[in-house]
């Protein structure tokens, strides 16, 4: 009886363990599916925002816009954009990307430079959010440039299995760290000049200073990498 009892107990434990494992696998699949759905929803929001902006071309949509401001927040706020960019860069590394998210997002980010210069009180939040995204992009592009330069030539064709990805990889291979360095240097200088002109609120100036310092650090790292490559 003890052997039979132990047999049933072992079967029960095994059955329970298999159910737990199945639940964990199901949750993992659902999480991956949810992340993918969120990514494509973000891409759709980007296209929708750009459509709204094109229809309202006489003004630059701000967060305070009563009709389109909430959609802009979904697109431009770093807590929304950066996780999607992280997912995009991971998809490049694993050769699974289907859309050039950087190409889609950068016009939105760049759009708020001029409005901020003309009306900083209205567009400070949008400009700073774009600056945070630009800082993150610079960091990831530098990392991707390293990965590309370290990839054997025989593997690069495998990385470039879509037209968008091929264009991105080719540009990184041609320009490397120097392009990121030039961008970070120019952007940091521009931010410092805006701070010196007191264009930001006190809280905004603090955030801008932090982003400028981050961009300057990336520029220094890029310069050191370029120096090592020339030796």
Image (cartoon, grey):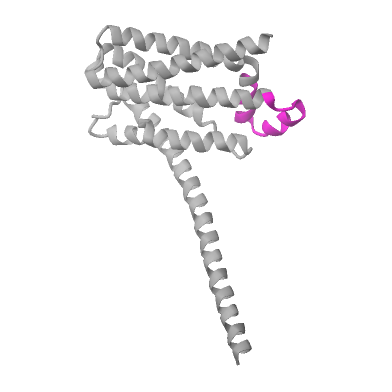
Q: Position of residue 222 (x, y in %)?
A: 55, 15
Which residue in the rendered view is the most extreme toward the right?
Answer: 154
Does the segment drawn in magenta span residue 172? no
Residue beneath the point at 33% across and 18% down: 208
Q: Main secondary structure of the magenta part?
A: helix
User: Picture quarter containing residue 25?
Assistant: bottom right
Residue beneath the point at 54% across and 24% down: 141
Instruction: Name the quarter where the N terminus is drawn.
Output: bottom right
Side (left or right) of 230 relative to 204: right
Camera-nearest residue between 3 and 212: 3
Q: Position of residue 116 (x, y in %)?
A: 30, 16
Residue 66 seen in the current view: yes
Residue beneath the point at 60% across and 29% down: 164
Residue 112 seen in the current view: no
Tell me: residue 165, above or below residue 39.
Answer: above
Q: Position of residue 170 (x, y in %)?
A: 65, 22
Which residue in the rendered view is the most extreme toward the front?
Answer: 2
Camera-nearest residue between 84 and 107: 84
Camera-nearest residue between 8 and 172: 8
Q: Which residues are magenta?
A: 150-171
User: Picture quarter containing residue 206?
Assistant: top left
Instruction: Name the quarter where the C terminus is drawn.
Output: top right
Residue beneath the point at 52% across and 27% down: 140
Does the segment drawn in magenta span residue 153? yes
Give the number of marks: 0
Q: Position of residue 207 (x, y in %)?
A: 31, 21
Tell me: residue 11, above or below residue 36.
Answer: below
């Amino acid at each position: 009886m003890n052997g039979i009892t132990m047999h049933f107990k072992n079967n029960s434990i095994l059955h329970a363990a298999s159910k737990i494992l199945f639940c964990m696998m199901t949750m993992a699949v659902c999480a991956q599916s949810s992340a993918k759905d969120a990514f494509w929803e973000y891409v759709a929001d980007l296209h929708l925002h750009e459509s709204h902006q094109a229809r309202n071309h006489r003004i630059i949509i701000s967060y305070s816009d009563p009709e389109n401001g909430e959609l802009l927040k979904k697109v431009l706020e770093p807590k929304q954009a950066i996780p999607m960019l992280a997912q995009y860069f991971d998809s490049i590394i694993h050769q699974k990307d289907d859309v050039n998210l950087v190409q889609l997002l950068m016009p939105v980010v760049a759009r708020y430079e001029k409005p901020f210069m003309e009306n900083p009180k209205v567009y400070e939040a949008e400009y700073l959010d774009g600056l945070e995204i630009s800082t993150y992009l610079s960091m990831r592009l530098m990392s991707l440039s390293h990965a590309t330069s370290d990839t054997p030539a025989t593997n690069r064709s495998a990385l470039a299995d879509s037209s968008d990805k091929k264009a991105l990889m080719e540009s990184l291979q041609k320009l490397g760290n120097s392009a990121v360095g030039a961008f970070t240097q120019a952007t940091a200088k521009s931010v410092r000049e805006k701070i010196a002109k007191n264009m930001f609120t006190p809280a905004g100036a603090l955030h801008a200073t932090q982003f400028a310092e981050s961009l300057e650090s990336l520029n220094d790292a890029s310069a050191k990498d370029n120096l090592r490559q020339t030796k």
